[in-house]
Image (tube, helix red, strand yellow):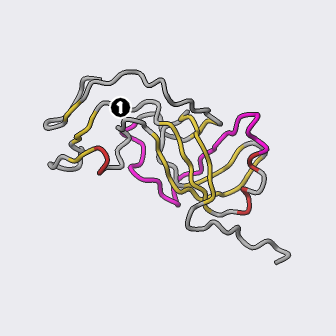
Amino acid sequence: MSDIRAHEIMVPTSEPDDARLHFIGRIHTPWTDRKDCPRQGKQDGPECRIEIFEPWVPALKGIEDYDQIEVLYWLDKSRRDLVVQNPGHSDRTYGTFALRSPVRPNPIGTVGAKLVKVEGSTLIVRGLDCLNGTPLLDLKPDRCAFTPKASPKD
């Protein structure tokens, strides 16, 4: 992890031991290399699958009532030691917290995804922007659309 761009600043880090996260599933996308992965998810992007592990499958109850969900995931392939970065698309440098870069002290990714359908313990979605095999941290109804869509009897 020693490749850094000009003007980037790296800090020494140690393995974190204070957060106990539970990966609740795995994300399956077409992308296996970061350079191929979209920079931001697009609602018209390819269908991707979010596999939910037991014992978390019952937590999906009611998720089908939403068109949009927030997907939080662990960017397990990301470096964690840059405080200043030089994005490949810019000549300017930025602090890590001023970017949506996957390089973060705690590499948590989040994206709003379109929920296409639920198939048992698997969600089919559009709009993801992460690599195949990415560990899933959490799912939430979209914060802007917290009210479920109307049911047929409404």
Picture mark count: 1
Picture coordinates of residue 56 (x, y %)?
73, 39
Report the residue that reaches farthest toward the front.
18
Give whichever of 117, 57 is nearer the camera: 57
Q: Amino acid at mark 1?
A: Arg
Report the residue that reaches farthest toward the bottom.
154
Instruction: Kindly identify the residue that appears in the image at 42 percent across and 53 percent down.
Output: 40
Instruction: Kindly identify the residue that appears in the image at 38 percent across and 41 percent down.
Output: 102
* Residue, disc 1: 80
Query: In the rendered view, does 101 fall on the left or right side of 152?
Result: left
Give whichever of 60, 105 is nearer the camera: 105
Picture coordinates of residue 108 (x, y %)?
46, 41
Instruction: Kindly identify the residue that appears in the image at 27 percent across and 24 percent down.
Output: 12
Report the residue that reaches farthest toward the right.
153
Q: Quadrant of the C terminus?
A: bottom right
Instruction: Write down the quadrant of residue 7 in the picture.
Output: top left
Instruction: Write down the quadrant of residue 86 in the picture.
Output: top left
Picture coordinates of residue 111 (x, y %)?
50, 52
Query: In the rendered view, does 75 fall on the left or right side of 147?
Result: left
Query: In the rendered view, does 99 fall on the left or right side of 71?
Result: left
Instruction: Write down the quadrant of residue 141 in the picture.
Output: bottom right
Picture coordinates of residue 126 (x, y %)?
57, 54
Could you classify mark 1 by the number of other residues whose Cα lies within 10 Å: few (under 14), some (14-19), or many (20 or more)? many
Q: Please provide the residue range marked out in magenta.
A: 34-58
Describe the element under mark 1 as helix, strand or loop: loop
Query: In the rendered view, does 153 fall on the left or right side of 87?
Result: right
Identify whether 33 is placed above or below 15: below
Magenta stretch, overall SS: loop
